Image: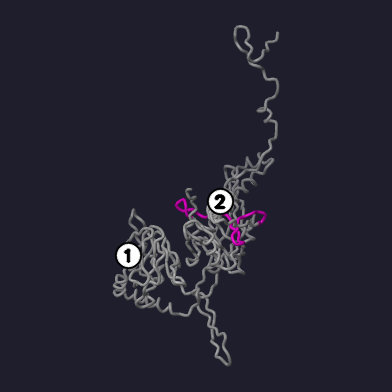
Amino acid sequence: MSTETNVGIPAQGGQAQTRQQQSLGTAGAKNLATTTKSAPQMQGISSRWLLKMLPWVQVAGGTYRVNRRLTYAVGRGRVSFVKTGADVRLVPPSLRELPVLRGFEDDGLLAELAARFVQRDFSAGEVLVEAGRPVDEVFLIAHGKVNKIGRGKYGDETVVGFLADGDHLGDEALLQADAGWEYTVKAATAGTVLALPWPAFQELADRSEALRGQILAYLAGSQAAQNRHGEAEIELSAGHEGEHELPGTFVDYELAPREYELSVAQTVLQVHSRVADLYNQPMNQIEQQLKLTIEALREAQEHELINNREFGLLHNADYDQRIQTHSGPPTPDDMDELLSRRRGTKFFLAHPKAIAAFGRECSRRGLYPDALEVQGHHVPAWRGVPIFPSNKIPILDGHTSSILALRTGEDNQGVVGLHQTGIPDEYQPSLSVRFMGINEKAIISYLVSAYYSAAILVPDAIGVLENVDVARPRD
């Protein structure tokens, strides 16, 4: 007698019976089926436009030397500060970034000088100095942004420059007697300055023979013939008539040119031999592991090319090539100024949020920049120059970033990437995968190494638009 019943129909005694399975279920079928698989995926892979667009120079000896014309160093860097609560103090060695103290070796005297600066807080709209008044103080901007306001050609007031964190003003009084402020300094944002009265500096100079010698050497260097870029002048004669006596000249070079050594990103890839032996179909396990490892190395490589303190583009851009936004968000005016600072700009590089902020400013003005097709991709552009995204450019304090403008190539005296091809066990250009052996736990190890660096051949090869506000404004 059959005991099979349908589910939900009560059997005698009031108890329900379950239906028996009559065919193979999907869970069991998967044991005999070959599933369709994707290759391993990785969310951290970005477009890496910087690696794609930089021209790469072969560095056979592992070191790349950038020879330049002799330049008179005037200390155009930025002073550093330490903040403790509401108190701001100078980092004394960073005072060497002031032109007059460039190369000064007495750390004790620098510490004494730093202690004489007085902290002052200012609010947005406050006037720090007025044009025409005597220059009687040196100001170091610890935090905030100020505008330099002067008279335009037609007598109207106009913003002639910006200063921000780490910048300085007032030290130009050394070069002229009874110097007066040629511009008004007005705060664009709230912030903090450290001020040093000139009498306090003069009293210290009167006591220190080393400091007096430093000042005299600076004054002598400032009088040497040089062009507007600070390079040693090449004497020429033009427009003369007759038997004019021609000047003799030569091109002087830097005696200690900068050298860039190739950096390295490395990791050890480990794969158990059992995995490599038994689970190698339909995809090669070592090959897939290696693929994702190389992607991670290339991401780290691009991050270092932008952010490394020794050779990264953000840290090595010349301070004279850094400009501030006019109002916070990146406007077409800001991009025009960044573009006009150099010839032959090849591309912009910006965080995606900065690109979106620039798009909002364009839309606000009724401008709709065209897109360019680059390597099969459509990217935004400004004035015919592509704007490539890079999430490696940091966003500081959650809302400010930077936009870079680059001229590239050795022939253009631009920015170049550095690498060395033909290395042992090369897997990709300047990237090697070296077998390290199998240990006692049957784990196979491979050393994966990528060698790279970047060089800025002349200062104006790269410019940076700083303090770009990427936060979306409230409606």
Residue 280 visible in image = yes
**Which residue appears farthest toward the top when viewing the image?**
13
Q: Position of residue 124 (x, y in %)?
A: 38, 58
Q: Which is more toward the observer, 190 or 437?
A: 190
Residue 301 to residue 463: above or below: above
Disc 2 target residue: 267
| Label 2: element kind | strand
Q: Is residue 386 magenta?
A: yes
**Farthest-out residue, bottom:** 243
Task: Name the amino acid, label 1.
Answer: Phe
**Residue 309: percent from the left, percent from the top?**
48, 60
**Which region shows up in magenta?**
373-400
Q: Is residue 228 above or below residue 246?
A: above
- Which residue, given by chain and number where applicable, does mark 1 sit on? 117
Residue 389 on the magenta segment = yes
Q: The disc labelled 2 sits on which kind of residue?
A: Thr
